Every structure is written in structure tokens, then in C-alpha cells.
């Protein structure tokens, strides 16, 4: 059963508030772990969580903006604001990674002992479990509701989980072996991992802004509907083109109809196609261009 757009929007915003609240609590846990131990590894982990909060706040703003209806200056709505949020999140991750690596290199040059690692490890484990639960929830919800903001925020938190696991393992080794040099080395590895994650988020956001086609499985679903409709109604479909605008789907297709059909009858079938594609995909805005059967179809911009 489809969710009403307003109800869906409120649901997505609640998820972002959960992310913000969880990230603030996690920052407190990690900051305390860094404070009591003096570990640059724990500090690097806390810095990434600060980026999580900032990114989640930007994501919440983007969700609110993307829900605004189309207006005179934005005829297709504001859904692409979510890609902007994903870009900001990716950029913040990159900044955090550079800060982490810089701090770690300084500690590598000037080593300092770490203390009370047992307490730091305990607080980090609790923080990891919180991020794991919230991150998985956000990714599932984002994919279900086609929200790139939720998916990006969830992936950020899950990356934080792996980061913290790496820190915990490294700090446990320091605790057991007394090799203090492992502390900045772990932090450098954490920074490199975060750097790669930020790059991937930026790449995906840019692909969305460049109007990438719908996922292969959704294009296949649309094509299957069109093939069945053509077989049952004596029409033909050509030039199927798709793209995503945040949570919105936009489809263009040419429907070739018998030359004897009236404009009214052709329009009725076009409406059926639009409604059928929306039902098959969950939601979609479809533009159907009518042509007589046998006409060579031209797509793309028309040049003189």
C-alpha cells in the first residue's frame, strides 16, 4: 500500500532527527573515550562523528526543501536538493579525514602515551552498537522511500561503525602489547578509509545531478509493462528514457498508435500508460508522446 507523500515526508524527517540525536550521544561517548585515554585514535573517531551531526543537519534541511512543490522557477520541483545534501555530506567526510590524518601524523612525529584504555574501549563499543543500529535503519528506509539523503546518512554511520571497529582493535593491541606507535597508525588508516567513503558519496551525488537513468531493475519493470501493454492493445513503444529526481521518477516514451485512432482515443491510452507505469514502479511522472505506427522516432534535442 502506497504511503501518502506528506506522511512519507514526516517519516523521513523523523529518521533524520533520530540520526541527529544518536550522533550527538555517540559524540559524547567517543569524546569521553578520547579525553580519558589521550588517544589520537579515539579522537579521530570522535571527529568523524562531529561530521555525522553536521551532515545530518544538512540532510534534514535538504529533505524539507525537496518536499516543496513545483513552482514558477522550479517546474519539476525541488527533489534534487537531496543530491546537494549528499555532496555536502561527502565533503564533510573529506574534511574530517584530512583533519584525522594530520592529527595522527603529528602524534606519530611526537608520540604520547595513552591511558585507561579499558574505559575508552568500553565507551567505543557502546557507540559502535548505536551507530550500527541507526545506520542500518536509515539505509533500509532510504532505499524503501528512494531518499538519497537517508541512504547517504546511513552509509556514513555504517562507515563510522567500521572505523570504530578498527580503532577498537588497534587500541586493544596497544593495551595488550604496549606499542604506543599503533595509536597514530590506526588513526591514519581510519582517515584513509573515511577519505575513500567521502569520494564515493560525492561521485554518487554527482551522478544523480547528471540525471542518471533509473536503476536497471526499475527500467526492466517499466519495459515489461510497456511490452505487455503493446501486445494487448495493438500499439508500439519506442525511445524509452528515464531519470531520477531525488525520490521522483521521470519517464519519457513514444507510443505509436494506428493511424485511424482519434486524438481522444489515443489520449485515453496515454493516460492508461501513465497510470500503469506509476503503479508498476510505485510512483512516476510519465510523458507519453503519440505518433502513428511506422514513423521513425527521433529522440533528444532537435537541432536546426
Image: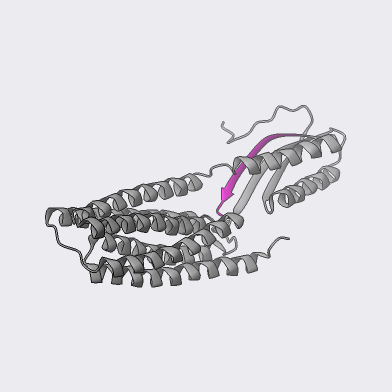
Furthest toward the left, the residue is 110
Q: Say whether residue 89 is visible.
A: no
Relative image position of residue 144 (x, y in whole percent): 61, 56
Q: Is residue 258 above or below residue 106?
A: above
Counting from the top left corner in percent of width and height, residue 277 is at: 73, 47
Kindly identify the residue that appears in the image at 12 percent across and 53 percent down. 109
In depth, the one of 114 and 155 nearer the eye is 114
Q: Residue at coordinates 77% horizontally, 45% vertically from top-left?
A: 273
Specify the quadrant of the image occupied by residue 43: bottom left
Residue at 73%, 39% in the rendered image: 224
Left or right: residue 21 versus residue 266 is left
Residue 36 in the image: x percent, y percent? 24, 71
Residue placed farthest to the front in the image?
Answer: 176
Which of 36 and 48 lies nearest the eye of the viewer?
Answer: 36
The residue located at (69%, 53%) in the rendering is 282
Write the start and end of the magenta stretch as one range.
237-247
Q: Quadrant of residue 131?
A: bottom left
Amino acid at each position: 500500500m502506497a504511503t501518502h507523500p506528506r506522511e512519507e515526508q514526516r517519516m523521513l524527517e523523523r529518521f533524520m532527527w533520530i540520526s541527529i540525536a544518536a550522533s550527538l550521544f555517540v559524540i559524547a561517548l567517543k569524546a569521553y573515550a578520547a579525553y580519558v585515554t589521550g588517544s589520537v585514535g579515539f579522537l579521530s573517531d570522535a571527529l568523524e562523528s562531529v561530521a555525522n551531526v553536521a551532515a545530518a543537519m544538512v540532510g534534514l534541511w535538504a529533505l524539507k526543501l525537496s518536499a516543496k512543490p513545483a513552482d514558477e522557477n522550479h517546474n519539476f520541483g525541488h527533489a534534487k536538493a537531496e543530491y546537494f545534501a549528499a555532496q555536502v555530506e561527502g565533503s564533510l567526510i573529506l574534511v574530517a579525514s584530512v583533519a584525522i590524518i594530520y592529527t595522527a601524523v603529528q602524534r606519530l612525529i611526537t608520540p604520547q602515551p595513552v591511558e585507561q584504555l579499558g574505559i575508552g574501549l568500553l565507551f567505543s563499543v557502546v557507540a559502535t552498537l548505536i551507530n550500527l543500529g541507526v545506520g542500518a535503519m536509515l539505509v533500509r528506509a532510504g532505499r524503501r522511500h528512494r531518499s538519497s539523503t537517508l541512504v547517504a546518512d546511513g552509509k556514513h554511520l555504517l562507515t563510522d561503525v567500521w572505523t570504530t571497529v578498527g580503532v577498537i582493535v588497534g587500541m586493544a593491541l596497544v593495551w595488550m602489547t604496549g606499542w604506543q606507535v599503533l595509536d597514530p597508525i590506526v588513526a591514519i588508516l581510519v582517515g584513509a578509509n573515511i577519505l575513500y567513503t567521502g569520494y564515493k558519496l560525492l561521485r554518487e551525488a554527482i551522478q544523480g545531478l547528471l540525471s542518471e537513468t533509473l536503476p536497471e531493475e526499475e527500467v526492466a519493470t517499466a519495459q515489461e509493462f510497456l511490452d505487455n501493454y503493446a501486445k494487448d492493445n495493438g500499439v508500439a513503444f519506442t525511445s524509452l528514457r528515464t531519470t531520477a529526481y531525488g525520490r521522483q521518477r521521470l519517464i519519457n516514451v513514444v507510443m505509436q498508435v494506428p493511424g485511424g485512432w482519434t486524438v481522444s482515443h489515443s489520449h485515453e491510452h496515454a493516460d492508461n500508460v501513465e497510470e500503469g507505469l506509476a503503479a508498476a514502479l510505485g510512483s512516476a511522472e510519465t510523458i507519453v508522446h503519440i505518433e502513428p505506427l511506422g514513423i521513425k522516432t527521433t529522440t533528444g534535442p532537435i537541432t536546426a
